[in-house]
Amino acid sequence: MFLKKKLTWLASLLIIASGLIGWQAFSGSPGVLTVAILDVGQGDSIFIETPNGKQVLIDGGATKKVLLELGKVMPVGDNSLDLVIATHPDKDHIGGLIPVLENYDVSQILESPVEGTTKTFSIFKDAVAKEKSDRVLAEAGQTILLDSANNIYLKILWPGKVASGVLTNEAAVVAELVFGESEFLFTADIPAFVEETLAASFPEEINTDVLKVAHHGSRYSSSFNFLEAASPDVAVISAGKNNSYGHPHKDTLGRLTKLKIPILGTYDEGTIIFESDGSVIRRVR
């Protein structure tokens, strides 16, 4: 692991319509945590950079589009990642990780314990083996320290012990990112019954500032009880514009609206970037 250069490019100054968090020019400010929900179409991909320069990628969407988006949030010539998390083996999460592994040096890979049966997963497995990264299977209770000086860490909340025959979404990796008073919750594609289990098992951890909404806003996730327990300041939905799945579903949007949780979507906004100094989270793009 080694320090990386800070981001230097600037984004246009915009005004957020919801009034939730003030937009500012994105400059990858030194001493802050950066979290970018990347616009990879119908899929998930999240880039994290800590003040000490550690870089994490959670999922990669379905296609090579993730390479274009990483090029916008990483310095030119920076072709390494400290940690890649493959939340589960569905194509819209690991398909884009195949070209990432082909084009980036990855120090460590954290994976769901459930394997897929598709050709995409087979190619992903081959790419992981070729990368020769340290491999770890995710399990609830793990803590990954990213920045010791600032005590920034990822806590794995799901999955627990996995029984045979479990569906991929049911064993998707759920992680909480913590920096001081700032908390982000990444829920992959977990269904509602897993959300209910998390609400019972980790009530403090799921209470968060920024929620990456589960399963692209599917009607089968984002239960009312879970959203109420999470009580985020903002919910971010990663989905493709006019996708064939109808994500985000009107029922999910209705539950978020009823709870007065502001909604941001990559399908409307493109890549969405937050910065935190450990106290305040700002939207910078």
Image (cartoon, rainbow, N blue to C red):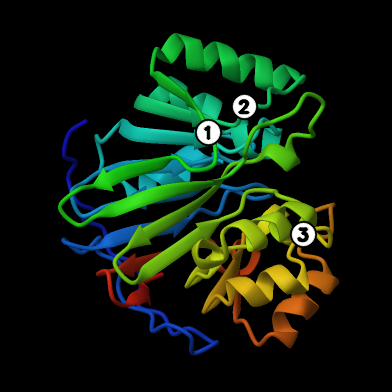
**Left or right of 213: which side holds 97?**
left
Secondary structure under tag 2 reads loop
On residue 221, the disc is: 3
The residue nearer to you, when weighing 190 against 35, is 190
Q: Quadrant of the C terminus?
A: bottom left
On residue 113, the disc is: 2
* Residue 61 placement (x, y as % from top left): 60, 41
Q: Quadrant of residue 183?
A: bottom left
The residue nearer to you, when weighing 13 against 214, is 214
Secondary structure under tag 3 reads loop
**Left or right of 40: which side holds 104?**
left
**Identity of the residue drawn at 44% across and 85% down:** 15
Residue furthest to the front in view is 201
**Left or right of 237: which side holds 54?**
left
Instruction: Look at the numbered discs 3 and 1 and tell me whether their residues touch, using CB distance below 8 Å.
Output: no
Residue 147 in view, yes or no = yes
- The mark that comes first in sequence, 3 or 1, is 1
Q: How many marks?
A: 3
Instruction: Look at the numbered discs 2 and 1 and tell me whether their residues touch, using CB distance below 8 Å.
Output: yes
Q: Nearer the viewer, mark 2 or mark 3?
A: 2
Classify 10 Å Cα crowding around label 1: few (below 14), some (14-19), many (20 and above).
many
Q: CA distance from mark 2 to mark 1?
A: 7 Å
Classify 10 Å Cα crowding around label 3: few (below 14), some (14-19), many (20 and above).
many
* Residue 82 placement (x, y as % from top left): 32, 34
- The mark that comes first in sequence, 2 or 3, is 2
Residue 104 in view, yes or no = no
Q: Quadrant of residue 117?
A: top right
Q: Amino acid at mark 3?
A: Ser
The residue at which mark 1 appears reads as: 138
Q: Amino acid at mark 2?
A: Pro
* Residue 176 placement (x, y as % from top left): 47, 55
Q: CA distance from mark 3 to mark 1?
A: 21 Å
